[in-house]
Image (spheres, rainbow, N blue to C red):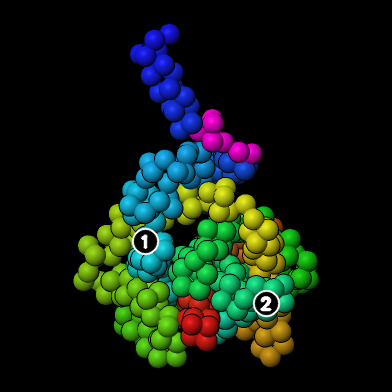
Amino acid sequence: MGEFGNFLVQNLGDFWTYTGIYNATWQHFAMIAIGIFFIYLAVAKEFEPMLLIPIGFGMLIGNIPFNMDAGLQVGLYEQGSVLNIFYQGVQQGWYPPLIFLGIGAMTDFSALISNPKLMLIGAAAQFGIFAAYMIALALGFDPMQAGAIGIIGGADGPTAIFLSSKLAPNLMGAIAVSAYSYMALVPVIQPPIMRLLTTSKERVIRMKPPRAVSHTEKVMFPIIGLLLTCFLVPSGLPLLGMLFFGNLLKESGVTRRLAETARGPLIDVITILLGVTVGASTQASEFLTVDSILIFGLGALSFIIATTSGVLFVKFFNLFLKKENKINPLIGNSGVSAVPDSARISQHVGLEYDPTNYLLMHAMGPNVAGVIGSAVAAGVLLGFLL
């Protein structure tokens, strides 16, 4: 063959060892299948497409097999690679506060301001977080891992990423994907629980129309909200501070450009980076473990407990309210912070039983309270675990 031929064969052999086909394992194909399934849910079922498409495609990127010893610097976990640099925003907790800034800039707290007692529903739904924390402890996870797992029950992806980056970085991929998965599955998980726990009479309760909220109240709310929550739970400051700051940009009326940037281009860019890098972090070697399976199970349980807690709390609270002030327990599910999907589910299920009873505006109160509640819960967990 000659020296040149031998050299060419050797080069082809080396090239073959670099290919994804050579380095592939069944685990890679399993994760690629999951990524394609996420994309299918987003495109065909329209389940949270803004989240599931970046995460699903990130799973494809993260599970392209390659020779880990070749020093190619293309993998997410290889120091200095482009993906690794993007992933720093997840690992160091930069992305979640910026997401909260955008959420604050697009959130209208009027329903909550007009009926402050709805905040109690958002607080009650956080019971799922602490219940899952205790169950995770019982299953053998250490306290910091259990705290990071429990936050999945808040159905708040950025909060889950923020907390797990501080408490359990090694579990962050599984926790983040679990949290976003259950956010996307709100329309599937919550309605059966709501129907099971309510009576036909309760489902048609009509609530008083929310009162008009003044501009002054809207401007004062983020200021007072920040001071009350962060004096109580300073460890929640990165999330709560940006949430209320974004809301002040929206409601002040004099920073429209900043508010539009926060809720538009900025949150879109961060959502893309966060989704793709979280998806890519699910490399088969790091993700397909017994712990990951347990995390998904505990996440589902946490989410179910949170939904159940919200609905049952409304039923209990109604025992102490006058007839004209009673709350429709179908809005109890919206205490989890999947905004605005949980509130839409309240509306959708309510219309099944009374086509003229519109619950959306009422449900938005506990829904936005759930955003605050999950951030406060994360701050509480950080406070006593770090």
Provide the residue designation for mark 1. Answer: 89
Q: Is residue 67 above or below residue 165?
A: above
Residue at x-position 72% and y-position 87%:
319
Q: In percent of the image, x 43 and y 8: which residue is there?
A: 1
Which of marks 2 and 1 precedes in the sequence?
1
> What type is the residue that disc 2 sits on?
Leu
Residue for point 28% across, 65% down: 259
User: Which is more toward the observer, 161 or 386?
Assistant: 386
Residue 244 within the segment the image draws in magenta: no
Q: Where residue 192 appears, x then y in whole percent?
A: 74, 61
Label the magenta part by its dominant secondary structure: helix
Q: Front-most of 85 and 369?
A: 85
The secondary element bearing badge 2 is classed as helix
Give 33 or 342, whichever is nearer the viewer. 33
Q: Quadrant of residue 295?
A: bottom right
Residue for point 52% across, 58% down:
173
Magenta stretch: give its range: 19-26
**Location of residue 34 in the rendering, given as x and y in whole percent from the top left corner:** 60, 44
Q: Position of residue 266 (x, y in %)?
A: 30, 58
Q: Is residue 105 above or below residue 286?
A: below
Residue under label 2: 137
Name the secondary structure under disc 1: helix
Q: Is residue 325 visible?
A: yes
Distance (Cα) linking label 1 and label 2: 29 Å
Which image quadrant is residue 347 in?
Answer: bottom right
Q: Describe residue 61's horizontal placement relative to residue 29 as left or right.
A: left
